[in-house]
Amino acid sequence: MSSDVIASASLSFRYRLITLLLVVVVAGMSQGLLLPLLSIMLESSGVSSDMNGINSAAMYIGIFCTMFFVERPVKRFGYKKVILAGIILVTCSSLLFPFTHSLAIWFVLRLLVGVGDSALHYSTQLWIVSSSPADRRGKFISLYGMSYGLGFSIGPLGINLLPLGRAVPFFVTCSFFVIVLLLVLRMKNEMPEQMAKGAATENRFVTTYRVAWFVLIPGFLYGLMEASMNSNFPLYGLRIHLSQHWISLLLLAFGVGGLILQLPLGIWSDRIGRKPILITCGIIGSLVFFAIPAAGDNIVLLFVLFAIAGGVVGSFYSLGLAYAADILPRSILPAANVIASIHFSIGSIMGPTLGGFGIRYVSVHSIFLFLGAAFLAFALLGFRFRPKGQAGAVI
């Protein structure tokens, strides 16, 4: 192969990687904005916190449902076409939010946004993983996670555009989607490799749960925490008399904490082990969540607590998958990824719903007490977990 061909292939891969990471950044930005923005808009319209939480869960219901059929269109039409379909679906749905106050229509729109987001993330993640060199695959997966975290952290800042008009935050987000859509159109479409027929799917799922039940919990906890913080915290903030400006900045601090510690936690888990890091982060996260209600409306203290909480639990999903790769054979790792995604969706659906009911019927502080208890329970379970084997050792 000539040097010109190699250089061209390298340039093509670099353009594709950068474009896919930009898609992930914008998708994360959209998701990070819609959750708190729509919660605030419903709260200002007098919608109860429990109904607000139920409506927020619609996006994650869409994500959850998409997991059961998204693989087929990707295999049939290729990565690029599914990514384009996801961008168009999210963009069109987002543009319609400002033009109606109907809870039922918002529920459907959020459902469609969830479907589009799920298609985007599934296609981009699979394309990056399948096309990355084996010796740099971990690095590129980390870049994927950091891109999503960056977008998700920036997203809540769009709340500050509300004074300019109800529709302005949505139009700004959609303009970014149009830009990445134009970039994706320039990429060459590729088809995923067809998996060889192997053991029954049920056997892979049973083996995954039997061997790695503990490492599948972080996906659930991450979804529970992320959705609760972005859907229920704005309601909590308004009820303790924080301004929309401070709410968006506190959510940003939470996300930035996760970005800062994501890479160091990954490196430490390579050296010390995934389990000790997960247990330690679970305990610290639990203590911080329990401490947030005591901070009241002290902005400085809340900033510190949010940054620490985001830092220690913001990598739970990726650390859980890394731990699964340590103790599961490669042949059933795809099953672990599917289960982790489903657990994430379940947690994301439960988070806003339980948080909304808790704020209304239990206590305004209930979301943090609930999250603190959940992470503490996880850490205690970790002391009981004993891996049954290392990767490749389980048939």
Image (cartoon, helix red, strand yellow):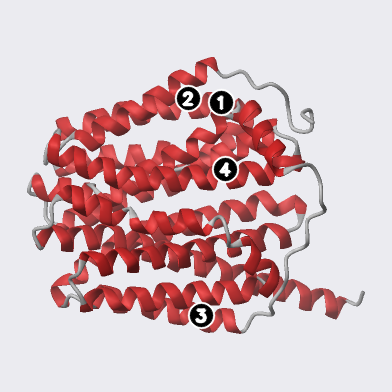
Residue 181, numbered label? 3
From the viewer's side, name the closer residue of 34 and 358. 358
Q: CA separation, marks 3 and 1?
A: 40 Å
Q: Quadrant of residue 268?
A: top right
In the rendered structure, which amino acid carries the disc numbered 1?
Lys
Q: Earlier in the sequence, mark 2 or mark 3?
A: 3
Question: Which residue is disc 4 drawn over?
Answer: 339
User: Is label 1 or label 4 in front?
Assistant: 4
In the rendered structure, which amino acid carries the disc numbered 2?
Ile
Q: Residue furthest top?
A: 384
Q: Quadrant of residue 45?
A: bottom left
Residue 202 screen position, x and y as percent: 68, 39
- Secondary element at tag 4: helix
Residue 4 screen position, x and y as percent: 84, 80
At label 2, counting other C-alpha atoms closer than 10 Å, the crowd grade (few under 14, some 14-19, many 20 or more) is some
Question: Which residue is disc 1 drawn over?
Answer: 275
Q: CA separation, marks 2 and 3?
A: 41 Å
Q: CA separation, marks 1 and 4?
A: 19 Å
Q: CA separation, marks 1 and 2?
A: 6 Å
- Secondary element at tag 2: helix
